[in-house]
Amino acid sequence: MGLLEFDGEPLTWEKLKPYVEHVKTHGIQQFLHNYRRLMQRPGDILKWGDEVEYMIIKFDHTNRKVQLSLRGEELCEILQEKEKKKMKNLTSLWRPEYASYMVEGTPGVPYMGYMAQFNVVEANMKMRRKEVQELLNDDEQIVSLTVFPRLGCIDFTYPPHKITGPESNPVSRSLFFPDEAITSHPRFPLLTQNIRLRRGKKIAINIPIFKDTNTPSPFVENLNDPESKAAAKPDHIYMDCMGFGMGNSCLQLTFQACNVEEAKLLYDHLAPVCPIMLALSAASPLYKGYISDIDARWQVIAASVDDRTNEEMGNEPLKNNKHVIQKSRYDSIDSFLSSNSKIFNDINLEVDEEVKSTLLNAGIDDLLAQHIAHLWIRDPLTLFSKKIDLDDENEADHFENIQSTNWQSMRFKPPPPGSSIGWRVEFRVCEAQLTDFENAAFVVFIVLLTRVILTYKLDFLMPISKVDTNMEKSQKNNAILTEKFHFRKNVMTSQSPACCAQLCSFKSNCTEGSANEIPPPDLSECCSEMTIDTIINGKEDEFPGFIPLIRRYLDSVEVGVEARCSISEYLNLIGKRASGEYMSAAQWIRHFVTSHPEYKHDSVVSDSIAYDLLVHCDQIEKGTVKCHQLFGMPRHKSEYIPAKKDLPNGI
Ligand code: ADP
Ligand code: MG
Ligand code: MG
Ligand code: MG
Ligand code: MG
C-alpha cells in the first residue's frame, strides 16, 4: 500500500451503505480495465520484499512495568520525511499501522533476484530497527513482538487512558482497549466503527485459557457491561474489539511473479505452506494478561474484524443479507487459482453471482472469476466523501477497498494501474519473531521455497479443506510437536527434473502429480498426515522435506560464501525449530512465564512478569543474552552466558 491518503469526510456505516453497490460495481470495472491492460504483461523479474510490524514499548524500571508507547504516528511522520521529499534509494519505507503504538517497516526498494540479496535482508532489518530506535527516548524500545502480553489490561498504554465502560470508547465500545490506541488516520477508526456497526454488535473474541493448577474453574471474568457479559464464554479469555487482533504484529512477504500464470501458481502452492509456517513461527501464547491455550494469533485476528451479521452467521434467516458466510473476512483462502487445481477446490464457496457472470462475460477464467466473486461477497468498510466517483480506467481505489479488506492467508495482488509493478502474491501468515535474525531466517526460507517450487515444478496441491484443518491445528499449544498436518505425499510432477526425483524416490499411492494428469478419484489419498519435522526436514520413505529440497537446489546455483553462510544458519534455525531441538517463540514465552518465580500458577501474567519477559526479549534481540532454548548452544564457549544466571528460576 502507498502512503495512506484520504479525501473528504469519512462515511460511517449508515452513510456508506447507499454506496455499497456503487463501490462493488466500480471496483469490478476497475479490475477489468486493469486486467485487460495487464494480463499479457510479459516477463517481469523476480522482486520481493518483507514487511515487519513493530511495537514501541516503554519501560518503567523502578516499578517493573512495561507499557505500549502511543508514539507510532509521531514517529511515522518523521520516518516518512525522506519518502515524502521523494528522495531515492531509501533504506526503508514506513507506514502507520492499526495501533498508535505500532509502525510497519519495509525495505526501501524491493529486492531483485535473490542469491546476492540474502545477507542484505537481515542487515536491512537491523538498519530499520536502528532508524526507529534513534528516535526513541532512553526508556523506550522498538520490539518485533507479535502480541503485547498485557494488551488490554489496566494502564497498558503510555500515556494511560482510563476506561469506565463502553461509553469511554465511542469507536470500538471496548472495555479494555482505548480508542486513543487506534491510529488517528481516519481509515483506522472508521474501519473499527463500521465493522462494529455492520456486524450489529461489539466484536467478541473468546480464546481458551490455559488452565493451571490455581486457575479458577470455571474461569469467568468480571465484566461490567451486559453486552460483554453475554458474549464472554467461561474458561476463555474474552476480548471485545479490533485492536486485540489488528494491534498485533506480523511478518509478511510479497513476491513479484514473471507473469499472471506464475503468480497463480505461487499463490496455490504456497497456500498449503501457510499453516506449516504459522505453526513454526507461532509467537503469541499470552493475551490480555493471561496465558492462553493457543500459540498463534490467527483466530484472534480473524475474530477481531469479523463484520458478519447474525444473518450471515446463519443464526437468523436471510432477509437483509445475501449469503450465509462461513468465515471472517480475515481468514485462510478458500480456493486455488491455477487451472490444474480445480478438483482440489472442495470448499463450498459463497460467491456474488452477478460479479462472477460479469467477470466470465468479460473473458476472465472461471477460477479467477470465482476468486474475485468470493472476495466480493464482502461490503466495503470505508469510504471518503470525495473519493466516490472515480475514473475506472485509471484508478483502482474501489477495487483495492474490497481487495485490501479481505485479509486472507495469501493475497493475489494485480499490478496497480499506472505503475511498473507486476503480478504479485503475498504470504501473510507468519508471526513476528523477536530478533532480526529469526525474521530474516523465515523470509529467506520462504523465498528459497518459492524458487524450489518453481524450479523443480513441485506440486503441493491438496484438498483445500485440509489446508483449513491444518490452519486450526497450527494454532494449538505446541502444535509443532503435538500435531500432524495433512501434506501432499508426492510433490513431484512429470515435469520435475531428475535431480529432485532422487530426493522424492519413495513409494507412494498417489499418481504422479496433478500437473496435466488425472488425479486419483479419492482426493484424500493424495496426502497423508505428517509432523512438521517430516515436512521441513524430510523423512526417508515418507517425504523429501523442504530443507533437503532447498539444499539440493542451492547446490545447483551460484551462491557467494557470505550468503551461503547466512542461509546455512537460517536453515539450521528453521530445521531445529521444526524438530523441536529449539523452542518456538511461543513455547519459549510460555515457558518463561510459567517458570517465573512470581508466577502463581493461576494463568495470570502480572505486570512484573511481563516486564521481566520484555526486558529479556530486548536483551536477546540485542544479543547481550544468548538464549539457547531459542537458538541452540553458541559455537564459541565464551559467547555462552548460562541460562540460569539470566532467567528467573533457571529456565
Ligand atoms: P501491503 O501492505 O499492501 O501488503 P506494502 O507496500 O506494505 O504492501 O509491502 C509490500 C512489500 O512488497 C514490500 O516488502 C515491498 O518491498 C515489496 N514490493 C514492492 N514492490 C514490489 C514488486 N514490484 N514486486 C515484489 N515486491 C514488491
Ligand atoms: Mg504493508
Ligand atoms: Mg501491516
Ligand atoms: Mg477515552
Ligand atoms: Mg502486507
Image (cartoon, rainbow, N blue to C red):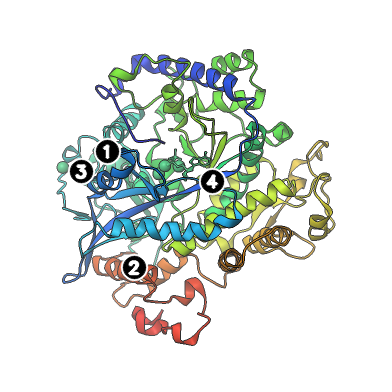
Q: Quickly name the residue at label 4.
A: 48
Is disc 3's CB within 8 Å of ligand 4?
Answer: yes
Q: What is the x, y in percent for residue 548? A: 70, 62
Question: Residue 340 sits in which quadrant?
Answer: top right
Marks 4 and 1, how far apart at CA:
45 Å
The disc, 4 or 1, on the residue closer to the chain's N-terminal end is 4
In the drawing, what numbered circle is on residue 553? none
Q: Is residue 110 left or right of residue 215?
A: right
Q: Quickly name the residue at label 2.
A: 618
Q: Residue at x 38, y 75 (%)?
A: 595
Q: Quickly name the residue at label 3.
A: 180
Farthest front residue in view: 88
Farthest bottom residue in view: 637
Contact flag, marks 2 and 4 (Cβ < 8 Å): no
SS for callout 3: helix
Marks 4 and 3, how far apart at CA:
34 Å
Q: What is the x, y in percent for residue 104? A: 37, 47
Is disc 4's CB within 8 Å of ligand 1?
Answer: yes
Q: Quickly name the residue at label 1.
A: 227
Marks 1 and 3, how far apart at CA:
22 Å
